[in-house]
Amino acid sequence: MKYFLNVVYIIALIIISPLILYRIIAHNRYKKGLQNRLGKINNENKDKKSIWIHAVSVGEVNAAKTIIGELEKKFPNLQIALSTTTDTGFDTATKFFGEKHNIFYFPFDFSWTMARAFKNLSPAICLLMELEVWPNFVQTAAETNVPVVVLNGRISDKSFSRYKLIKAITKKIFSKISLILCQTEEYASRFVKIGADKDKVIVTGSLKYDTAQISDKIDEADQLAAQLRIEGENLIVAGGTGNDEEAIILDAYRNVIGKPQCRNYRLVIVPRKPERFNEVAGIIKQRGFAFLRYSEVKKKNNAPITDKQTIILGDTMGDLRKFYSLAKIIFVGRSLVPMGGSDMMEAAALGKCTIFGPHTFNFRQPVNALLEGSGAIMVKDREQLQQIFKKCILEPEFAQQIAKNGQQIIKDNQGATAKTLEQIEKLLN
C-alpha cells in the first residue's frame, strides 16, 4: 500500500508542479523547509523521546498553545517537536515556541521521508491537530509502535462528503489511530461514519476556547495605538479577511460613515494572508479611500494621522489581537465569502461586539454557541453588514451587551485542555 501511495504522490506532484512553481515565484511560498519536508529534522537530543505535535497552519498552532503548556509541565522528560505545513504557521510556531521547542515543516507523506523523520525525532506519541491524517505517516507510526491521537478533531461538511466516498480507505487509516478527541458530538458521529472505531472516539470540546484569552487589554496594544495615534478612537476592525471580502467591507463602511452620527468611526483591515497585503492595498485605493499601511508606521515608529476617515491596513503578522483589543466593533473575516471563517472566539473573549458572515463551517460549534447566547451577530451580505455596523454605533448599549454575552460564553465553554490531557496521559503512562 505505501509503495503504491508513493507512486500516486509522485504523479500528483508532477501534475501540480506548474501551480507550485507559480506560487513560489508569485507569492514567495514553499521556499523554506525543503530539508524538513524530505524528512531531515534537526534533533540535538536524539536519546530523548519526543512528543510530535502537528498543526497545519496558524489556527491549529494557536489551538495547540494551552495543551503544549500543560505537556511541558506534565512530561518534562519528553521534548516537544512541533511541525506545520504553511509558512505562516511556521512563523507563528517559531514566535511562540521557537526558543524552547523544535519547530519544523511537516515532511512529505512518502514512506521514506516519514521513516527518516520518525528516526530523527524518536516520538513517544504523535498528536494531530483537528484532522491532518496522512496514510504513510500513520503507517510509519504503527510500524514503530507510536500511538497517534487526533486532538480538537473536526470534519467540515465538504470533507465529510469526500471521505464518505472513500470510506474503505479512511477506515483502514483510522484503524491505525489510537484516539480521536473531538470538539462536538456531531464531529464524533462523522468520524465514526467514515470508518473510525466508535470506542476510540471521545468528545472533549474545543481547545480553541481555552486558548481564547479572557482579557480586556492586550500587551503592547497601547504601543500600537500610540504609533498610529489612535488612542481613544472608535475603531471597526475587520480581521482575517479573505479574497473578495475587503471590497464588501469597504462599501458597507462607506455607506455607514456617510451618516453624521457615524463619522467618528475608523476602519482597520487585517488580511488573513500576508501575500495579499499589496492586493488589499490596491483594493482600498481603488475604492477611493486614503489609507495607511501599519508596516510603514512600524518601521518609522511615528504616524502623523489627522483624517478620521483614513483606513488602516494591518499588513503585519502577529498584531491582529492588538488591533482587536482596541476595537469597538469586530468583523471576523473569511465569512462573507465561502472560506469557512476565521477565529471568532478570540474576538469574543476580548469582550468585543463580534460580527461574522454566514460562511463559518470551520467554526460550527462556537458559532452556534455564540448565536444561541446572543454573544455575536451573523450577517448575510453587505446590506446587513452595513445595517449592523450602523446599529452597533448608534446603539452602544446593544453592542456592549453582545460583547458581554460573548465573553461569558467563551468562559462557560472552556475546559477541553484538561479533558484532552487526561487522555494523553493514559497513553503515555
Image: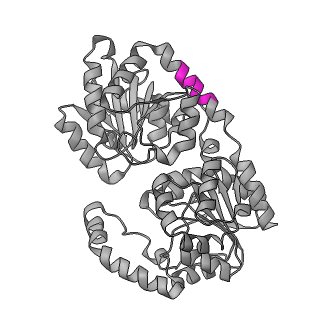
Q: What residue occupies the far bottom of the structure in this picture?
A: 3
Residue 167 is inside the magenta segment: no
Residue toward you, 5 or 112: 5
On the rendered structure, is 145 left or right of 99?
A: right
The x and y percentages for residue 172 are 60, 75
Q: Quadrant of the C terminus?
A: bottom right
In percent of width and height, residue 297 lies at 33, 39
Residue, x 63% and y 61% (percent of image)?
A: 192
Front residue of this view, candidates 178 and 241: 178
Report x, y in % for residue 239.
41, 39
Q: Is residue 266 visible?
A: yes
The correct choice, above or below, for 186 with respect to 162 in the image is above
Where 323 falls versus 116 (above or below)? Answer: above
Residue 171: name its quadrant: bottom right
Q: Position of residue 142 (x, y in %)?
A: 67, 79
| Looking at the image, residue 114 lies above or below residue 298 | below
Could you tell me which quadrant the N terminus lies in? bottom right
The residue furthest right is 429
Q: What residue is shown at x 50% (from left), y 74% (from top)?
A: 107
Residue at x 56% of width, y 73% of height: 168
Magenta stretch bounds = 401-408
Q: Can residue 184 be seen in this snapshot?
A: no
> How many marks overall?
0
Chosen colour scheme: one colour
Work out whether residue 100 or residue 285 is closer to the camera in this orientation and state it: 285
Q: Majority secondary structure of the magenta segment?
A: helix
Q: Residue at x 24, y 48 (%)?
A: 279
